[in-house]
Image: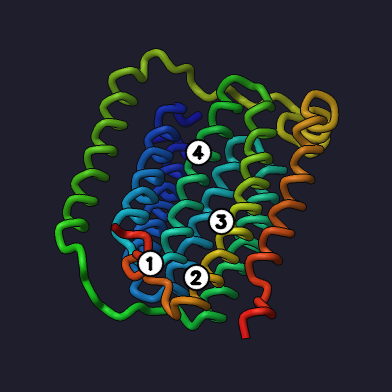
C-alpha cells in the first residue's frame, strides 16, 4: 500500500494550488472554484486518515463537508449573481466600494 | 515500484495538472472543466482508499451538481473572460512566493515527521460500504445529520432571497 505521507503531500500540494488560486485570480467565480479545491484537498486527507486508522468517522466527516460545500456554493453563487447585477462585473478588484 | 504506487503517481500527476490547469486557464469555462477532471481523479483516490460511498457522492454532488451550478452561473453572467486591467501589480509575485513557502513548509513537516505516521492498512471487508456509513450516520451522527437538513434549507432560502428581483427599486 502507498504510505499515508504521500497522500498528505498530494493533499498539501492541492491545497496550496487552491490557496494560490484565491490569491492570484481576480474572477470571483474562479476564486470560488479554488476554495472548492481546498475543501477537496482536506476531504482527501480525511479519507486517507480514515483508512489509515480503519475508522469510518473520517468518511462521515467528508459527507458533512460536502453538504456544507454545497450550501456554501449555493449562497456564494447567489451573492456573485447579486454583485453582478449591481456592478455589471465580477472582477473582485472592482468591488471596492467599502475602501476608505 | 509496486502497482499501487504507479497508479498513485499517475493519478496524482493528473490531479495536480488539472488543478494547475484550473488555475491558469484564461477562460472560466475551461477552469470549471479542469476542476471537474480534478474532482473525478479525487473520486478514484477515494475508491483506492476504500470509500466507494464517498467516491459516488463526490461524483454526483461535486462533479455533478456543484460544477453544473458553476457552469450555469458562468454562462448566465457571460463572465468567461475578464478584461485585463491590473491594479495591484506586486500582488501576483507575492502570492506565488507565499504559496511556494506553504508547499515547502508542508513538505518539510511531512517528510521529517513521516516516521511517526503508520502506513495505510489493508482493507477490512465491508469497510466504507454504504451500509457501514449509513449505520454510523444514523446512530452516532444522527443529530449532525438532522442539523445538515436545516443548513441546506437555510442555504436554499438564502440563495432565493439573494437573487430575488427587488420590486420596490423601480
Circles 2 and 1 in contact, beta carbons < 8 Å: yes
Q: Position of residue A38 (x, y in %)?
A: 46, 46
User: Distance of mark 2 from mark 3, alpha carbons?
Assistant: 31 Å
Tag 1 and tag 4 share a subunit: yes
Q: Is residue B34 visible?
A: yes
Front residue of B16 and A25:
A25
Residue at 47 percent of width and 74 percent of height: B29
Image quadrant holding the C terminus of chain A, namely bottom left
Q: Is residue A39 left or right of residue A67?
A: left
The residue tagged 1 is A95
The residue tagged 4 is A42
Tag 3 and tag 4 share a subunit: no
Q: Position of residue A14 (x, y in %)?
A: 40, 46
Residue at 22 percent of width and 38 percent of height: B101
Q: Residue A83 carries which label?
A: 2
User: Distance of mark 2 from mark 4, alpha carbons?
Assistant: 29 Å
Residue at 62 percent of width and 68 percent of height: B69
Image mark 4: chain: A
Circles 1 and 4 in contact, beta carbons < 8 Å: no
Q: Which mark is residue B159?
A: none
Disc 1 packing (10 Å; few <14; some 14–19; many ≥20): few
User: Distance of mark 3 from mark 4, alpha carbons?
Assistant: 16 Å
Amino acid at each position: 500500500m502507498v504510505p499515508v505521507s504521500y497522500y498528505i503531500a498530494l493533499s498539501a500540494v492541492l491545497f496550496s494550488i487552491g490557496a494560490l488560486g484565491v490569491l492570484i485570480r481576480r474572477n470571483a467565480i474562479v476564486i470560488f472554484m479554488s476554495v472548492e479545491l481546498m475543501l477537496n484537498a482536506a476531504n482527501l486527507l480525511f479519507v486517507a486518515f480514515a483508512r489509515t486508522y480503519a475508522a469510518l468517522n473520517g468518511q462521515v466527516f467528508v459527507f458533512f463537508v460536502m453538504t456544507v460545500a454545497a450550501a456554501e456554493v449555493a449562497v456564494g453563487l447567489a451573492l456573485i449573481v447579486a454583485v453582478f447585477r449591481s456592478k455589471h462585473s465580477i472582477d473582485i478588484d472592482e468591488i471596492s466600494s467599502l475602501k476608505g | 515500484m509496486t502497482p499501487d504506487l504507479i497508479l498513485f503517481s499517475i493519478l496524482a500527476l493528473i490531479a495536480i495538472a488539472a488543478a494547475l490547469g484550473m488555475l491558469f486557464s484564461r477562460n472560466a469555462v475551461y477552469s470549471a472543466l479542469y476542476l471537474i477532471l480534478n474532482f473525478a481523479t479525487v473520486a478514484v483516490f477515494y475508491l483506492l482508499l476504500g470509500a466507494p460511498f464517498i467516491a459516488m457522492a463526490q461524483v454526483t454532488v461535486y462533479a455533478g451538481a456543484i460544477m453544473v451550478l458553476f457552469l450555469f452561473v458562468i454562462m448566465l453572467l457571460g463572465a468567461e473572460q475578464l478584461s485585463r486591467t491590473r491594479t495591484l501589480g506586486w500582488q501576483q509575485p507575492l502570492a506565488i512566493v507565499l504559496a511556494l513557502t506553504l508547499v515547502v513548509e508542508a513538505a518539510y513537516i511531512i517528510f521529517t515527521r513521516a516516521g511517526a505516521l503508520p502506513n495505510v492498512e489493508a482493507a477490512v471487508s465491508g469497510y466504507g460500504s454504504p451500509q457501514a456509513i449509513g449505520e454510523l450516520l444514523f446512530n452516532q451522527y444522527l443529530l449532525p445529520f438532522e442539523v445538515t437538513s436545516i443548513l441546506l434549507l437555510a442555504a436554499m432560502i438564502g440563495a432565493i432571497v439573494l437573487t430575488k428581483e427587488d420590486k420596490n427599486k423601480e
